[in-house]
Image (cartoon, rainbow, N blue to C red):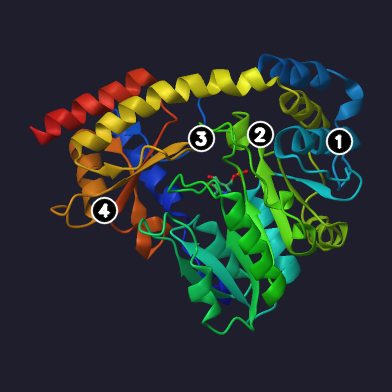
Amino acid sequence: MIINPADRTKTVQEYYFSTKLAQIERMRRDGADVINLGIGSPDQPPSENTIARLSSEAMKPSVHGYQSYTGAPVLRKAFSDWYRKYFRVELNPDNEILPLLGSKEGIMHISMAFINAGDEVLIPDPGYPTYSSVTNLVGGIIRTYDLTEINGWMPDLEALEKTDLSKVKIMWVNYPNMPTGAHASIELFEKLVAFAQKHKVLLCNDNPYSFILSDEYRSILEIDGAREVALELNSLSKSHNMAGWRVGMVAGKSEYIKEILKVKSNMDSGMFLPMQLAAVEALNNPESWYTTVNQVYVKRRKIVEDIMQLLNCKIDKSQTGLFVWGGLPQNVESCESYVEEILNKAHVFLTPGFIFGKNGDRYIRISLCATEERLLEAKARLEKMKG
Ligand SMILES: Cc1ncc(COP(=O)(O)O)c(C=O)c1O
């Protein structure tokens, strides 16, 4: 290529799943029936009224124009009602909620709004890879903090306090946690808020998994004083089976939201109105809707636990969320080569833990986003592979 890309492109690589999905596609083209248990894209549908509202609204001639940068007022109100009902948090729909095109873009917007080149960012290891890549893209300095099985996948704030925190601007936390499925206690959230206040750090809780296999909904914004230092991302992707729709939000103090809006309003031009109105329907689903969705995941998780057992992987049965995270047995050399071997021999794709950081090296993650039939088929193939 005769035009050089910007230096920042050298700080990131193509997303792991993007390259892996291309490999799976090639294998499928060559006739292999690959079972993808990697990515967390819910395969169950959104509620019927959500789809019905999208269809009926899309038929109207007046709904196809640009929309407000701050989202439709009814959607902000629905998010606010949802937060009151499930998270016991009062959010002013006028200025404390900003709808997003999924929560992933919020990681970029928040980083662009608050990180100067050279600012440090605390990132969980293991953790969602986007926190690191976005930090690199905006010129921030990554400072990973360890989450380990021994400490229940919780940050060791005392250890962090023994280090120089003067340049830290943002701390990413993600509870319920992906990939480990760990849940934070209110006490941990209280400690995190106190830590953020003491060190003047913007605490960002990425919270897309609250409703999956859990009925204990928790928000960082529940904590007294959190509003001064914390933001929360949330999303309909996992909780409402709407990953492809790209509907999420960021919530927090209006002054912070205003800064994020400065960035975002220069990047996109709002969300298709029928989708926003359909998202309102989704947010108003009765609580029993989540229960019905979770009943399916409960059955799938049982099969995935059996698969983990078959692979001699150690699991914590109290984990929640859309995945099962399992520790590899001693005799397996590396998660990357193990996953590759399983993909090539059994045509089953599992996620190697190393993509989430060095502390994920001895783990694999299996998604619950496949039917019981496909999971049983994957189990049968793995049984055959193991001989
Ligand atoms: C921890 C975490 N945060 C954010 C996201 C992005 O979700 P969304 O679809 O809302 O952009 C994911 C998706 O896999 C995730 O696992």
Foreground tag (2 vs 1): 1
The three-letter amino acid code for the residue at tag 1 is Lys
Foreground tag (1 vs 4): 1
Upstream in sequence: badge 3 or badge 4: 3
Q: Are marks 2 and 4 in contact (CB under 8 Å)?
A: no
Upstream in sequence: badge 1 or badge 3: 3
| Residue wearing tag 3 | 41
Q: Are marks 1 and 3 in contact (CB under 8 Å)?
A: no
Whole-percent x, y for residue 241 in the image: 59, 29
Whether 15 is drawn above or below 24: the answer is below
Estimate how packed mark 1 is, as few (under 14), some (14 to 19) or many (20 or more) residues with alpha carbons within 10 Å.
some
The three-letter amino acid code for the residue at tag 3 is Ser
Upstream in sequence: badge 2 or badge 1: 1
Whether 64 is drawn above or below 169: the answer is above
Q: Nearer the viewer, residue 22 or 35?
A: 35
The quadrant in which residue 116 appears is bottom right
**Numbered label attached to residue 77:** 1
| Residue wearing tag 4 | 335
Upstream in sequence: badge 1 or badge 4: 1
Evaluate whether residue 340 shows in this view. Answer: yes
Residue under the image location 73 percent in, 15 percent down: 52
The three-letter amino acid code for the residue at tag 4 is Cys
Estimate how packed mark 4 is, as few (under 14), some (14 to 19) or many (20 or more) residues with alpha carbons within 10 Å.
many
Estimate how packed mark 3 is, as few (under 14), some (14 to 19) or many (20 or more) residues with alpha carbons within 10 Å.
some
